[in-house]
Amino acid sequence: MDKVIAEKKKITRSNLITFAMVIIAYVIVEIMINTGNVSSLFKGLLVPLCIYSILAVSLNLVVGISGELSLGHAGFMCIGAFASSTWSMIMKSTSMPEGLRFFIAIVIGAVTAAFFGFLIGIPVLRLKGDYLAIVTLAFGEIIKNLVNALYFGIDANGLHFSLEDSMHLNMDGGTIIIKGAQGITGTPKNSNFTIGVILLLIVLFIVLNLINSRTGRAVMAIRDNRIAAESVGLNATKFKLLAFTISAAIAGVGGVLYAHNLSSLQALPKNFGYNQSIMILVFVVMGGIGNIRGSVVAAVVLTVLPELLRGLSDYRMLIYAVVLILMMLCTSAPSWIQYRERIMMSFGKNKKVNGKESN
Amino acid sequence: MAAMLKVDSLGISFGGLKAVDNFNVEIEKNELYGLIGPNGAGKTTVFNLLTGVYQPTSGQIVLGDDNITGLDCEAISKKGIARTFQNIRLFSQLSVLDNVKVGLHNRHEYSTLDGIFRTPKFRKIEREMDEKALSLLKVFDLDGFCNYKASNLPYGQQRKLEIARALATDPKLLLLDEPAAGMNPNETEELMNTIRLVRDKFDMTILLIEHDMKLVSGICDRLTVLNFGQVLKQGQTQDVLHDPEVVKAYLGD
Ligand SMILES: Nc1ncnc2c1ncn2[C@@H]1O[C@H](COP(=O)(O)OP(=O)(O)OP(=O)(O)O)[C@@H](O)[C@H]1O
Ligand SMILES: [Mg+2]
């Protein structure tokens, strides 16, 4: 029992370190802002840092913990962004307090994205194999294109949808909220660094505790060996679906932050397209698959670095590709693994590896 | 004495191949029963039928008083059949302790929300699970390895961990698929003691597949010999092993 308790303490400590890192980084940045040591460029990066960290953690839940590949996480972000932004636009003119309105916007973003995650997951996660990657890839692109074609307005008669143009909404006065490719203009700017950090901490709390619970163990067991997991009475589809839905909800929250950080929201390949999904995957792979703290670190480093090396921005995707290949070699090629283990040994790392996600 | 497992004319075909055909067996409570036969005879397929991995094309399976024919893996595990695999299937990235705790999943429950919010219920049940899992590991002398990653255990210990995980589901019937495969004579000897211990300590009914005749004749009360998917012989271990037909078809000279 002593060993078990010691192990639990180790995991708790590791989780606390993750929270502490985020909080300390936040405090340092706040101090720097208040002493006027932060460029406006960097200030503009603060909310995106939170968004990408949240998305990386979300995707790691699918890729690292559940062992499925999703190539459409930007799609869930897109859904969270547009659903919550629509809500905020509708309620903007009412007397609802801003804080409450934004809180509900977050819930709406999360729930809508979760709903779509669940819907996609039901048929796909029954299958054994990498079907999720293909379906989510298609889903991400479809959602982006659909939103680009979507017109949505509200008037005294209720809600109006169209996939043609604003004329087809048949509006009787009222306001048009989503204007096709022009998207939504005028979303209230409710996101800020503090809220971003709070949401990141909540997401970390949920994901880390989930991983170190009965449910998380079941999800990881199914990842490691589906047949054995079913033989001890686990319903593989149910747990994969649960992890995927939670992940989609979290990605939706990232979308809410995104939408409420800019006054104009459009579904572009740049923000909600395939490249964005891959970028989030890069964060996850670089931070270590299954390593939650690593995801946050990688998201921050890989978002800040390119800005610091502005001159290299044209080569950004190229550099990512090279680094990704190196990472894969480093983590998968036997000779590299041997080499890495030798180095670890020489640092006196304990050979006894802790099998559990402990970050 | 009522049978713990009663299988009646069980069969399955893959395409045209009748992998198992008209298979019958009755295993009594607390019995140690052996299933033997040449490679490809259909032994593992019988296990897959009993545990719901495959659905039988004919026949029925009764466990205790429950007709479990046609149920899926999850339901059958809950009814009380647990197994190990011919090629070890552990949760390789999880710790030894967590492998057993996954086995306890359906016997010690709290909700996902309890887990996320670390409620008192979460703490209490986790503690129970830790204690239960450790006591199971102790039976197999694995408690010292509880924090090891399962894939880092030596081969023999991995086999034992698989049995411990199966027992964690609190089964009525334990199926072991070639538990001695890849073991040297000393390890096999030790394994025989472990299997006997499991039977006595947990009052367990065990059905095992094995090619090692020393183990089979050492611990099995009764045997069924399977050949080309059909029962070739059934009866007391020594009678079956000396049957001329069995010697000819399987044991050789
Ligand atoms: N899913 C499947 N699809 C098609 N054929 C199968 C399937 N599973 C088993 N078989 C076939 O059924 C027959 C019995 O296989 P099984 O694995 O049960 O043999 P076994 O008695 O366990 O052999 P061994 O001693 O080698 O483990 C084999 O011919 C095998 O190829
Ligand atoms: Mg077999």
Image: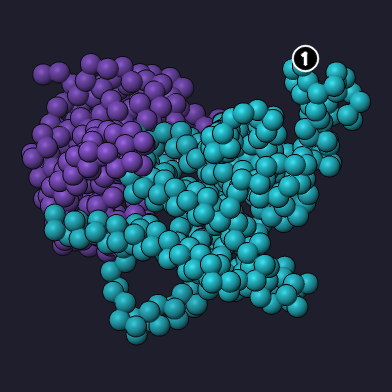
Q: Classify mark 1: residues with Cα within 10 Å, few (<14), some (14-19) or many (20+).
A: few
The location of residue B119, given as percent across then percent down, is 27, 39
> What residue is shown at x 18% (from left), y 21% (from top)?
B3
Q: What is the quadrant of residue A111 in the picture?
A: top right
Q: Which chain is cyan?
A: A
Q: Position of residue A153 (x, y in %)?
A: 79, 26
Residue type at mark 1: give it. Asn
In the picture of the structure, the residue carrying the numbered disc 1 is A157
Is residue A351 shown left or right of residue A102?
Answer: left
Q: Residue furthest bottom?
A: A346
Which of the image's four quarters has the N terminus of chain A?
A: bottom left
Q: Residue at x 39, y 59 (%)?
A: A19
Residue found 38% across the figure and 45% down from its top: A210
Residue A318 lies, with reference to residue A240, above or below; the image says below
Most foreground residue, A126 or B17: A126
Residue A272 location (% of width, % of height): 71, 49
Q: Is residue A298 above or below residue A133?
A: below
